[in-house]
Structure formats: structure tokens, C-alpha cells
């Protein structure tokens, strides 16, 4: 069976077309559109009208590409930048009416559960009790569990992009005062979650997301060109050193460091501070870098639990405005 998935994040819209025979999502085609939605939100989080149009165009292109690859779907969801927007419902309506694809937002806790499932499937049962951290543009997802799905999942407003806008825009590089305020905010948000993770005492900690992958490369992990099966770790001590290195440089110069790409250079410091503070407060000296995350989690859950699961997991389903198109279906866009 071939399925497709569209993930609208704070920086990109990504399409994954995957074969899922045997219950393993094996990508056969991927493509992304760089929209940087988080750069086009108002002070209250409202997504600008022109950015919504770009999103509609990208989702339409993703649907057309999925059809060319003869894939069912796409399963389409948006993360924190849309989920937290005051005009969320209008954004989702415009996507549905303009593309014939029903996009949803997933609760942050559901994103944490799905990313945990992806890490569990990738790392296997030998990891034992597992803690999972994932830094996105708008939120930090944390989960812990002993089985297939987590016993505990949380989503915190500690995304790298969000914190960069809130705390690190006054000067470049930021001063000690800005970093102090940022750390205070992170510790406050993490207090209860970190206490729970310390109490659970996980055998293994895993981190996922592009932010953690780039930070791991900065700290000495193998580059991505070596493939996903190379073991990569991220040590809390090394991440602390990375925070100091990133804080000493203006955003433009951070892109010269190993692993840090130009589009993510500005928010790399906030991501490093979140990651280091979280690992330290949770008592996790090191973490395994997992190449699977939310997208693989959605595909795994869809394959293992069926289309009914996706129907139930869809938050606030949107009915598009009447249009001369065929009725929408989770099976895919109109023919």
C-alpha cells in the first residue's frame, strides 16, 4: 500500500510518499516547500493572508504530486504555528476549499504520542523505559513510556522559533540579560515535566526533530550524508558548550558552524538552550538522536490502527465552503 502525508510546519510544508508494506513506512518520494509561516504571523499569532495563500498553493501542489505517485491520501496536518493561530479555522477552511484536501491540527499531546511511537519503533524494545524530546518551531514535545505508546505526554510553548522571537531579537548576538530571561522562562515551563521524567528514571532518552539533528552535528555527531543508520548521540555537556559557542556569534555567522544551516541559524541558539536545559533538569546526561519523528509516527499509527484512528485523531474537522468539486474523503483528494 502506498500512502502520502502532508506536514505543514513553522518553516516548511513537506510531502512524504511512502510504501507501507509490512507495517514499515519506506519513503519513495519526498518534497518540501519553504514557506516560513512563522515569519508571517502577527503579534497575536494570526497568520497573514498572503501566507495562507502560499499554504493553499503548497498543499495543492502536494496533493497533485501525491496523485502522480499513485498514493492514497494525503493525510494532512499542521503543527503549532497553525494550531495556535487565532485564525486557525479560517486557515483550515481555505486549505480545504482551495485544494480539496482536509487539513487538521493535532493537539500537542497527540504530536508527542506519535513522535514517541516513531522513536519506539525505530529504536526497538531494547531501549526499555523511554523518554522522548522533540523541539519544533512553536512547541517542545515530551513523552515517557514503557510500551508502544507513552504513559505520559506533554506539549510546552518552548519552540525554537517562538522563543527566538520572544527573547532573542533585541540584539544580535543577544546579551547576558536576554539569555538569563530565556533560561528562566524555560525552567519555569519545564518544572513539572522535568520532575516527572526524573521520577520515572528512563533507561533511554531520545531526541528527534531537525533542530536536535543539527545540534547533534554541531556537537560532533556524524553528518547526515552518512545515512540514518549511523548511531548518533547528543551529550548534555557538549550541548552546554554549543550554547556558549552559538551565543558568542551573530545569527549570520552561526551558519558557518558544522550542522547549522542558514535558514535555522537565528533560532539555533534558542533550540540549544531549550535542549540543554531540558536534558539537565530531567537528569539525562545523553540522548540518542532518532531520525524518525512526527511524520513517521502518523504513518505508523495509520497503518497499525487504520483510517478510523485518523478520523478520531483529527482535531476540529473542517467542512469546506460549498464548491463544484467532489465530496471530500480521507481516502484522498477528488479524482
Image (cartoon, rainbow, N blue to C red):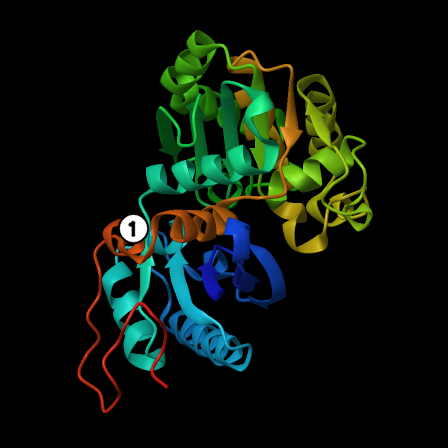
* Residue 62 picture location, percent across and down: 49, 74
x 53%, y 22%: residue: 278
**Tag 1, which secondary structure?**
helix
**Residues packed near mark 1 inside 10 Å, few (<14), some (14 to 19) or many (20 plus):** some
Horizontal and vertical percent position of residue 39: 49, 58
Q: To which quarter of the image does residue 275 belong? A: top right
In the image, taking residue 192 as reference, residue 16 lies left or right, namely right
Residue 289 x/y as whole percent: 65, 33
Picture mark count: 1
Of residues 324 and 55, the one nearer the viewer is 324
Q: Is residue 1 above or below residue 300?
A: below
The residue positioned 53% from the left and 57% from the top of the image is 21
- Name the residue tied to disc 1: 309
Q: Residue 196: image x %, image y %?
A: 39, 14
Q: Is residue 286 left or right of residue 13?
A: right
Q: Is residue 284 left or right of residue 252?
A: left
200 in relation to 298, above or below: above
Residue placed at 46% from the left, 48% from the top?
300
Q: Is residue 44 visible?
A: no
Q: Is residue 182 above or below residue 308?
A: above
Amino acid at each position: 500500500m502506498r500512502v502520502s502525508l502532508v506536514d505543514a510546519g513553522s518553516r516548511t510544508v513537506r510531502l512524504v510518499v511512502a510504501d507501507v508494506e509490512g507495517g514499515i513506512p519506506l519513503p519513495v518520494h519526498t518534497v518540501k516547500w519553504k514557506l516560513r509561516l512563522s515569519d508571517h504571523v502577527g503579534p497575536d499569532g494570526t497568520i497573514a493572508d498572503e501566507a495562507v495563500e502560499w499554504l493553499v498553493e503548497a498543499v495543492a501542489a502536494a496533493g497533485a504530486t501525491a496523485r502522480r505517485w499513485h498514493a492514497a491520501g494525503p493525510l494532512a496536518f499542521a503543527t503549532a504555528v497553525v494550531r495556535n493561530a487565532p485564525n486557525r479555522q479560517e486557515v483550515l477552511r481555505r486549505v480545504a476549499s482551495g485544494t480539496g484536501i482536509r487539513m487538521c491540527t493535532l493537539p500537542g499531546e497527540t504530536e508527542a504520542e506519535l513522535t514517541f511511537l516513531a522513536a519506539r519503533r525505530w529504536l526497538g524494545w531494547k531501549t526499555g523505559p523511554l523518554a522522548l524530546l522533540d523541539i519544533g518551531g512553536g512547541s517542545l514535545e515530551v513523552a515517557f513510556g514503557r510500551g508502544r505508546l507513552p504513559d505520559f505526554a506533554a506539549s510546552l510553548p518552548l519552540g525554537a522559533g517562538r522563543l527566538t522571537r520572544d527573547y532573542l531579537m533585541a540584539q544580535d548576538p543577544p546579551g547576558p540579560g536576554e539569555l538569563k530571561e530565556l533560561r528562566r522562562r524555560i525552567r519555569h515551563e519545564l518544572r513539572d515535566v522535568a520532575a516527572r521524567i526524573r521520577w520515572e528514571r528512563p533507561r533511554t532518552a531520545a531526541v528527534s526533530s531537525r533542530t536536535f539533528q543539527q545540534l547533534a552535528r554541531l556537537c560532533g555527531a556524524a553528518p547526515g550524508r552518512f545515512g540514518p543508520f549511523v548511531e548518533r548521540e547528543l551529550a548534555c555537556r557538549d550541548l552546554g558548550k554549543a550554547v556558549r559557542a552559538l551565543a558568542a556569534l551573530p545569527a549570520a555567522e552561526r551558519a558557518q558552524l558544522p550542522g547549522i544551516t542558514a535558514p535555522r541559524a537565528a533560532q539555533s541558539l534558542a533550540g540549544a538552550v531549550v535542549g540543554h536545559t531540558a536534558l539537565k533538569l530531567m537528569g539525562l546526561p545523553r540522548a540518542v538522536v532518532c531520525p524518525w519523528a512526527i511524520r513517521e509516527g502518523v504513518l505508523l499509527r495509520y497503518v497499525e490502527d487504520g483510517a478510523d484512528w485518523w478520523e478520531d485523531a483529527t482535531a476540529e474537522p473542517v467542512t469546506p465552503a460549498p464548491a463544484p468539486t467532489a465530496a471530500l474523503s480521507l481516502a484522498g483528494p477528488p479524482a
